Image: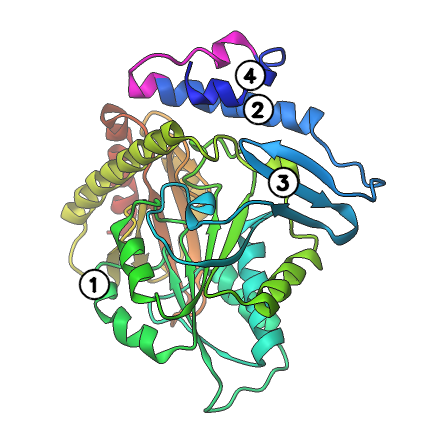
């Protein structure tokens, strides 16, 4: 019996048998079966594992070998075990000292808590984003730093955002890291075995690092199990900073409940499948990128952008008066209903997203093409959709 079933034997009475039969060696069958199992688990947990808000004492639970403690009065959830980075980033091969770490109710809660903690401890600081930053993370910083005054001597927080880094950006990381006071790494778009993540952790070994992540994207087979996030403080023991981080999460009710922590946390089998699924997304995205690049004319008002994670790519263009959201809804079905219009990635279909980068001159428009874990023959439909999009752009 696989360790999946050993961990979940108590659920046999609740789950349909088809959710438990995944002994096939075929990758597609294993992924589909575990996807179904995750959906069933989530439904079960929502029904059966809930916190009683009148419970004033510590509630404890053995969660896949990790003892958890929940205190409603403090809105805090702890893993009562020696922490290593791979608890929160399964498969991460790094021996950095962990001062503290927490699961959060979303990735943005982890980022907001990091920004708040630094402000409370050190006062106003500059946000340095040489490679770009996710717009919600920038908005969180603007919110936290509202009415704060910066000066030339204000310390710097370097943000390394996996969703924004482009090929070549890593060349100047060493100098940027040496200059800053702290580093925040948002690893959401990188698999734990990503070599760039390992390189950055090595470069930052002498810095205090806040490693944040949204686990929704790559860690649960696209099942959208929950909005789970985490923050891991990599530093020598620092109780004051650890306490501030804990309170920054607690004061906004930012801890997850038990049922939000995705299953198979410690399973090596799960990590292998996650890695294989990520490789498939990257392979499909690379295929679509090269397909699009060949068809896109070389013009100053059209720019194709690739990222180090290879989970999606973008076309940047100047506004031309067309109703892009309406066009995307039309185009998405032309490739055999293969496309979805949404603002995410890494699920079970080719996705399109249109948005406007307000920080750029003339409110530059962007269409983002997100790969999927679909077999290659189904990606052909995505190529047809891309042809229609380019016909409108060109």
Q: Nearer the viewer, residue 349 or 281?
A: 281
- Residue situated furthest bottom in the rendering: 152
Which of pointers 4 and 1 lies earlier in the amino acid sequence? 4
Residue 79 percent location from the top left of the image:
59, 45
Is residue 121 at least partly visible in the picture? yes
Residue that carries the numbered disc 2 in the rendered image: 41
Q: Is residue 194 left or right of residue 327?
A: left
Q: How crowded is mark 1: few (under 14 residues within 10 Å), some or many (20 or more)?
A: few
Q: Which is in the foreground here, disc 2 or disc 1?
A: 2
Residue 68 percent location from the top left of the image:
63, 40
For numbered disc 4, what is the local secondary structure? Answer: helix
Q: Residues within 10 Å of mark 4 (few under 14, many from 20)?
A: few
Which of pointers 2 and 3 lies earlier in the amino acid sequence? 2
Residue that carries the numbered disc 1 in the rendered image: 168
Which of pointers 3 and 4 lies earlier in the amino acid sequence? 4
Which of pointers 2 and 1 lies earlier in the amino acid sequence? 2
18 drawn magenta: yes
Residue 183 percent location from the top left of the image:
42, 68
Quarter of the image that includes the N terminus: top left
Which of pointers 3 and 1 lies earlier in the amino acid sequence? 3
| C-alpha span from label 2 to label 3 | 18 Å
Is residue 323 at least partly visible in the picture? no
Q: Which is in the foreground here, disc 3 or disc 1?
A: 3
Q: Which is in the foreground here, disc 2 or disc 3?
A: 3
**Which segment did they paint magenta?**
16-29
| C-alpha span from label 3 to label 4 | 19 Å
Residue that carries the numbered disc 4 in the rendered image: 9
């Amino acid at each position: 019996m696989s360790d999946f079933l050993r961990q979940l034997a108590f659920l046999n009475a609740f789950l349909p048998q088809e959710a438990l039969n995944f002994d096939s060696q075929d990758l597609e069958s294993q992924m589909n079966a575990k996807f179904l199992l995750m959906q069933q688990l989530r439904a079960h947990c929502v029904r059966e594992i809930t916190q009683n808000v009148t419970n004033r004492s510590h509630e404890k639970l053995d969660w896949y070998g990790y003892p958890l403690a929940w205190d409603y009065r403090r809105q805090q959830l702890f893993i009562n075990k020696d922490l290593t980075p791979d608890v929160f980033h399964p498969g991460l091969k790094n021996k950095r000292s962990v001062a503290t770490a927490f699961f959060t109710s979303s990735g943005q809660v982890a980022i907001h808590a990091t920004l708040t903690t630094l402000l409370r401890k050190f006062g106003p600081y500059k946000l340095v984003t040489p490679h770009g930053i996710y717009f919600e993370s920038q908005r969180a910083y603007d919110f936290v730093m509202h009415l704060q005054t910066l000066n030339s001597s204000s310390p710097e927080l370097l943000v390394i955002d996996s969703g924004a880094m482009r090929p070549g950006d890593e060349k100047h990381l060493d100098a940027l890291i040496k200059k800053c006071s702290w580093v925040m790494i948002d690893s959401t778009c990188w698999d734990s075995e990503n070599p760039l993540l390992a390189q950055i952790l090595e470069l930052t070994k002498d810095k205090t690092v806040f490693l944040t992540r949204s686990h929704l994207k790559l860690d649960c087979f696209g099942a959208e199990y929950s909005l789970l996030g985490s923050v891991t403080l990599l530093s020598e023991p620092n109780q004051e900073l650890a306490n501030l981080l804990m309170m920054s999460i607690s004061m906004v009710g930012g801890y997850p409940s038990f049922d939000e922590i995705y299953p198979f946390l410690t399973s090596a089998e799960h990590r292998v499948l996650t890695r294989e699924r990520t490789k498939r997304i990257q392979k499909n995205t690379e295929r679509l990128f090269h397909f699009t690049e060949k068809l896109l004319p070389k013009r100053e008002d059209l720019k194709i952008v690739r990222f180090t994670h290879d989970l999606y790519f973008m076309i940047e263009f100047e506004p031309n008066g067309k109703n892009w959201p309406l066009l995307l809804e039309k185009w998405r079905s032309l490739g055999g209903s293969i496309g979805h219009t949404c603002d995410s990635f890494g699920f079970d279909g080719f996705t399109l997203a249109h948005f406007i980068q307000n920080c750029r001159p003339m409110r530059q428009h962007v269409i983002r093409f997100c790969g999927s874990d679909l077999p290659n023959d189904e990606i052909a439909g995505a190529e047809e959709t891309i042809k229609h999009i380019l016909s409108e752009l060109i």
